[in-house]
Image (spheres, helix red, strand yellow):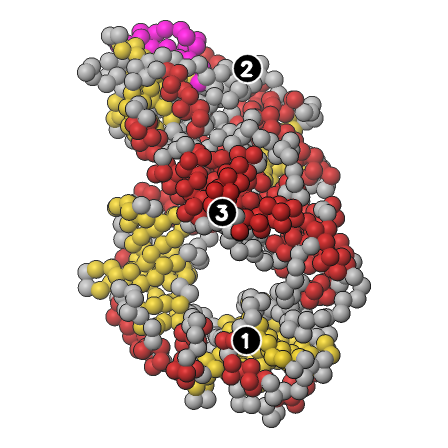
Amino acid sequence: MRAFAALYEELDTTQSTNLKVAAMSRYFREAPPADAAWATYILSGRRLKRFIGPALLKRWLIDEAALPEWLIDEAYASVGDLAETIALLTAGTAHSEATADDLPLADWIEDRLLPLRDADDDIQRQSITGWWRQLPYRQCFLLNKLLTGELRVGVSQLLVTRALAEVTGIERTELAGRLMGEWQPGALFWQGLHAAESPRTDPAVPYPFFLASPLEGEPSQLGDREAWQAEWKWDGIRGQLIRRAGECHLWSRGEERITERFPEIVDAAARLPDGIVLDGEVVAWKDGSIQPFALLQQRIGRKKLTAAILATVPVQFLAYDLLELEGQDLRAAPLRERRAHLEKLLADASPLLQISPLVIGSTWDELAGARADSRQRNVEGLMLKALDSSYGTGRQRGAWWKWKIEPHSFDAVMIYAQPGQGRRSNLYTDYTFGVWREQELVPVAKAYSGLSNPEVEQLDRWIRAHTLEKFGPVRSVEPSQVFELAYEGIAASARHKSGIALRFPRILRWRADKPASEADTLANLQAMLMQAPDEVRRSS
Amino acid sequence: MPPPLVTVTENGLYCPAGGFHIDPWRPVDTAVITHAHGDHLRHGSTRYFVAEPGVAIARHRLGTDHHPMPLKYGEQLQLGSTTISLHPAGHILGSAQLRIEHEGQVWVVSGDYKRQPDPTCAPFEPLACDVFISEATFALPVYQWQPTVEVVEEIFHWWRANRERGLASVLFCYALGKAQRVLAELRAFTDETVYLHGAVNVLTEVYRQQGVEMVPTLPVTGERKTDYKGALIIAPPSAAGSPWMRRFGDHSSGFCSGWMRVRGNRRRRGYDRGFVLSDHVDWPGLIETFKATGARRILLTHGYSDALARYLNELGISASALETAYGDEEQQ
């Protein structure tokens, strides 16, 4: 586990993507096959379910460190991460990374961690606290991350496949495919990754999604309008609909199987010929038009789909690409060809399977005009796709662009701040904002992102110097700083004091030029809510 | 109970019986200085007392028209009705603790200090006292320093690995103290020349004149085209991201600070590597020091004063926090 802990540390701190790829390649070359397979599993974003809850780990830590609970809490608040706090307090400095005993990563997981699930409390405690005492810091941290089920590594799937391609000599797209679906990490899987031919055995396995990059600036930089296809950017759930071997499967972009959540779409797909894979968007659809994401969200949240919810939130699949036809992988074909096949295929399909229409406009200016209507249409803007592009893997820039509209925004006053998690653990980075109702500021949004690092640090100093009161980690601050906040959606909510819930609020800019008295009022926000569609106003 | 020997005034820590200030943050008549970092040694006072090994640095910082008065470590001086003396604090060259004796009472002001050995300065000496005023920059139990040699070895390996990849290594260190400590510790691994940013270079020259042994150094100059591929460069953190950095081309960046012990800080600062090397006392060092002084009361400045005071009170050691205007050079 030492080598993997060192790799984790390197990936965690290094800024250069080339160095990240080099570090992974080096690890894959040197590690035993089973370790390399587990590392691939972890690096590609898969997670082992949590072994032990944080409350229990904290209780053991209090005893191990022989420190009062409040001081552990103080340390935790300052570090921002329990796994790391434990490692810092227990691993001590006695064991150096180089000299401590080492056990392969696969053995750690298979022989030590997995059996823990069935062990009784005493054994769990003895094993884990024993490891804490014995492991040097980096490995202790990694172990705790595995125990709490929170091990995430800051590399994209694209970088992982780049490193794997260097090591195996297999093409990246092919590798990305081999990493899809469900698989068991082990030496066998690792050998399979190297195999020249890999027969696709599981018909449920999706293709890796091709992702668009945000378009900054004007689309004229893309060249001729004729070389591009324009579609609406739907506000739904990106999905891959698979019709193979007499079965239907629906996968979300997060590689989650969502087949059971949308039975009507799956039923409609069952009427398609076999050997088809569609890429598209699941959207809430009523009376011939798309509904706000807030409505779809009500359905995602339900454990059980009742007839009532199926009726309140009808859905549709808007297909925009065809990845497989008659069992043949079409991804290398140009988009104009795939689109032609798609149009033919869906010509007589169920109304629940619609083709995502092209947006008409013979010049970039005309498209810009269409994009200006996005808000009325409940879409997020336009998608621009190169007509002669193949269907790539991950976020490869150049062929697919999302040209989103400017978000809604309003001005609010910062009223509370608290420290962030992880890399922002000893900075005040989580802010609560309020708008005016008479003489009072009512909290309407929490936002974490949108400021530059220097701004965050400047604001942190300001917060420390202008704290009114402390409640645990939260500070109330002098209500004088105004921020322009953006959001994607607005809905009525009985759970919020303001009566309003904002979707994806974030900071657009710090309005140092504005006095707090000029921030927006709750009445302004309520007016924005009234402009939103009926379903949302009544929802939640 | 006798009146306090040291109080906090708007000008800084003040000793009424001695009529002097300690590291004042505004100009005063008499200033006794624990060390030459900017937040402890400020311009404008009439008279300065500093520990003798720190005179050259203090003059460099204050300008040559100032003549800080040197006190040998342990040498006693009457100020007002007090007897004062300066004793090694192990923080940087010439850093001192201030011992104040008055009518049978002894107070010690630690200034900034550390308990790890440091080849560039005399080691911290615990002093028996009634009241100990201590810094608390890193006063949380997560801050425990690993042996210095291990950290310097990490720095050395990082430099070598970068060289193999054809990269320059730019190590950001506070220009006074940390940089020279790294240069001195590197002697155990190499006698290769290290390149220095101008701000680091002048202070390194002052150290060298005081007889501190370090690896050979050269200033980074704009004149001739030096190829920095594979070289180690030491620069102050303020140089990060500045146009000055362009001359190094592809490089890996590292940062030396006690704050690098926490992952969130390592990631947020955006350096490729963080090295946990501090000139401040760590958590075990604080507790050990308090016991060694035998002080019946501990007063705390900087950092996590509140948490440490509460912990000490729970252990039965009377402690409280003092509000001061001292900063933290390791944050910079």
Q: Is residue A393 magenta?
A: no
Q: Are marks 1 and 3 on the same chain?
A: yes
- Picture mark count: 3
Marking on residue A259: 1
Residue A312 in the image: state x and y as whole percent.
39, 82
Q: Identify the subunit bearing mark 2.
A: B
On screen, residue A537 versus residue A347, left or right, reads left
Residue B212 in the image: state x and y as whole percent.
57, 17
Residue B79 in the image: state x and y as whole percent.
30, 10
Q: CA distance from mark 1 to mark 3?
A: 36 Å
Q: Which residues are drawn in magenta?
A: B66-89
Residue A37 in the image: state x and y as whole percent.
68, 54
Q: Quadrant of residue B19?
A: top left
Amino acid type at mark 3: Asp
Residue lying at 44% horizontally and 40% vertically, measured from the top left = A60
Q: Identify the subunit bearing mark 1.
A: A
Q: Give the residue pinned by disc 2.
A: B210
Quadrant, the N terminus of chain B: top left
Q: Secondary structure at mark 2?
A: loop
Q: Give the residue pinned by disc 3.
A: A120
